[in-house]
Image (cartoon, rainbow, N blue to C red):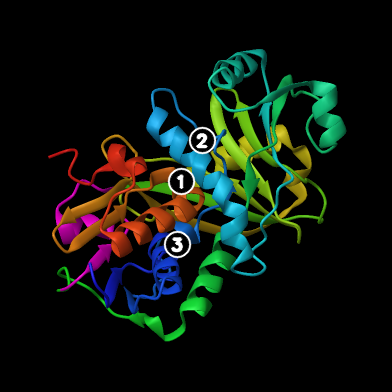
Amino acid sequence: MTSPLTVVGGGIIGLSIAWRCAQRGLDVAVYDEGRDDGAWYAAAGMLAAAGETAFGQEALSALLLESSKRWAGFAAGLGSLGYDRTGALDVALTSDDLASARRMWGYRDGPQPLASSELRDLEPALSPRVRGGALLPGDHQVDPRRVVAALRSALGDAVQPRRVDTIPDGPVVIAAGIGTAALTGLPVRPVKGLVLRLRAEPGLLRHVINGYVDGRHVYVVPRADGDIIVGATEEERADLTVTAGAVLELLRSATDLVPDLAEAELTETVVRHRPGTPDNAPLLGRWRTDVIVAAGHHRNGVLLAPITADLIADLVVTGRPDPLLDAFAPGRFA
Ligand code: GLY
């Protein structure tokens, strides 16, 4: 494939690919409508290679881990992104929740089990009702809105506000999230996620918290400035409605774990759609002669941005697919 290259989609995936390609000397244009409607706008930015590992997803789990290792180098090239390596805590409210968490730890990379008192030594704001948990030292966080701003700034005029209804001619990377389905016919579906943003005293929490709460999951992601992101629903729906029930469920779970969050200011509710695929692993690689696809990152777009950008830039520049792409062929559901 030769330059110039068009990247369709200016979310975190499209911008990361364009940035890496530009660094390798390609003439790149990114087409994006500029409506901040991508999943990145809602994402909490958990780099949760352990926390997002799922049963039966070996290839995806390996990709998450590899991308996690690349985050430090990726962030170093972009300036201040809120990249924080304090680590994450799995926290279980009840003994049933603790049993569920333990089943996952057997499957994950490096959890260090902790008693309730040890958890509260690390995070004094946790409820005394918490039964136990584990430290996931390799799970970090970054602020996706800062990442996108930094990538847009690095790419400058290469990012062009443009609506795309058909695949452009010439070498192109389709990284259009749920919009990939309309452009290609590939099976990328919207998976609704609601997150809440709260404002609390800076320092209330330090770690990313993955909560197991009465059979439900919630995450609580504290930023250094006092912002706290609480997420997320996962609904097979295409609407953008913020429902009272979903807000109630997230706040109930979060305050069960961290009671002081009830005093925090609720500053934002935001719904976006994760791009899901039939196996909820991404579509990565060549799809047609001049068309590469990088879409369908579902719950892991932020974590997978560095490895996606590296592998797709390699493919664009060399024409040869890395073996890591084998499990993620865009045409695998045909
Ligand atoms: N990665 C977290 C989420 O998709 O909600």
Dot 2 or dot 3: first in sequence order is 3
In the rendered view, would you say 32 is above or below 106?
below
The image quarter containing residue 241 is: bottom left
Q: Quadrant of the C terminus?
A: top left
Report whether the residue tagged 1 is closer than 8 Å to ligand 1: yes
| Residue 186 magenta | yes
Give the numbered dot on residue 52: 2
Query: Disc 3 marks which amino acid?
Result: Ile
Identify the element where label 2 is drawn: loop
At x 17% / y 61%, what residue is drawn? 183
Do we see residue 175 in this rendering? Answer: no
At x 56% / y 34%, what residue is drawn? 51
Report whether the residue tagged 3 is closer than 8 Å to ligand 1: no
Of residue 289 and residue 216, the one placed in the foreground of this image is: 289
Q: Residues within 10 Å of mark 1 (few under 14, many from 20)?
A: many
What is the residue that sits farthest to the bottom in this orientation? 157
Q: Quadrant of the N terminus?
A: bottom left
Report whether the residue tagged 2 is closer than 8 Å to ligand 1: yes
Query: Disc 2 marks which amino acid?
Result: Glu
Tell me residue 38's x, y (percent). Answer: 40, 61
Q: CA distance from mark 2 to mark 3?
A: 18 Å
Tell me residue 143's x, y (percent). Answer: 61, 59
Identify the element where label 3 is drawn: helix
Query: Cβ–Cβ below 8 Å for labels 1 and 2?
Result: yes
Q: Is residue 23 left or right of residue 256?
A: left
Residue with the mark numbered 1: 300
Q: CA distance from mark 1 to mark 2?
A: 8 Å
The magenta region covers 170-189
| Residue 206 magenta | no
The image quarter containing residue 262 is: top right
